[in-house]
Image (cartoon, rainbow, N blue to C red):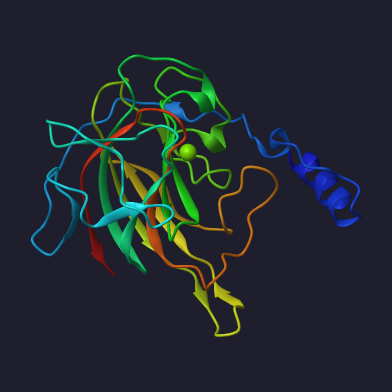
Amino acid sequence: MKYLFFFIGIAAATGQVKFEPEHTEVWEPKPTKITPGINTAPPSDAIVLFDGTDLSLWEGEDGTPASWTLNDDQSLTVKPKSGGIQTKAEFGSIQLHIEWKSPEIVKGEGQGRGNSGIFFQKAYEVQVLDSYESVTYSNGQASSVYKQHIPLVNATLPPGKWQTYDIVFNEPKYEADGKRIKKGTLTVFHNGVLVQNNVEIQGTSVYRGFPKLRDINLPKKLYLQDHGDRVSYRNIWLRKL
Ligand code: MG
């Protein structure tokens, strides 16, 4: 794998390669599959972004009203092809709690099964995916920092079961001219299990090619992805750090 990246790096430097998505997929090693426990409940100092009642703190990715489906069980479901939703407010470094479930009726494979995602500052994705009994590239499975960091273990529960992410996001630091002086970091607990241990964010989450520096002029909104699958969310809160 090391040699493949070396080769691609050389080729990229000389402008001789056209990237395909497969060039940045890492399939081995596969994180060990484990059975997690469950926890929840917002602390008193949290900003509650979604408690099941309304989407008043959210908007569509183009700034129009958020149109995802509100359910009777106080959850929220992706409305496929409506686009992602994002917070109206912007956030720097945060602790985030969010619960999600992939559709009970399983369809699709790999990246096409229960795909959504949580994008910090609309740029850095912690993957949401049905990775219970579905194979994909390791750096793109549930709780990966998409195409940057493979989770330490696979703590995914079966489709249709509620799952938790507890995430610490430390934003990258920039100088006024846009030069990055410190990389951001992510720590992720999936269903209470540590799966990302203070990993460095290389740059924006990119499907094709390598991470890029985030445009510092773009708003720092928390963004949930519409990848065409009816993934549901509930109990979303954060604490500013
Ligand atoms: Mg995704």
Seen at 70% across and 47% down, the residue is 209
* Side of 169 where 11 appears, left or right: right
Residue in the image at 16% along x and 61% along y: 46
Q: How many marks?
A: 0
Q: Quadrant of residue 170?
A: bottom left
Residue 16 on image: x %, y % = 91, 47
Q: Is residue 114 left or right of residue 180?
A: left
Q: Position of residue 227 (x, y in %)?
A: 47, 35
Q: Residue furthest left?
A: 44
Q: Quadrant of the N terminus?
A: top right
The relative height of residue 233 versus residue 214 in the rendered view (above or below) is above
- Across and down, in percent, residue 9 comes to 81, 51
Image quadrant holding the C terminus, namely: bottom left
**Outermost residue toward the front in this view:** 64
Compared across the picture, whether 17 is left or right of 46 comes to right
Q: Residue at x 39, y 58 (%)?
A: 63
Residue 163 lies, with reference to residue 2, above or below; the image says above
Most foreground residue, 213 or 196:
213
- In the figure, residue 153 lies in which quadrant? top left
Indicate the quadrant where residue 40 lies: top left
Q: Residue furthest bottom?
A: 176
Residue 71 or residue 201, whichever sits in front: 71
What x and y, as percent, mark residue 129?
Answer: 42, 31
Judging depth in this view, the residue of 84 and 18 nearest the camera is 84
- 240 with respect to 151 (left or right): left
Q: Is residue 190 above or below residue 111?
A: below
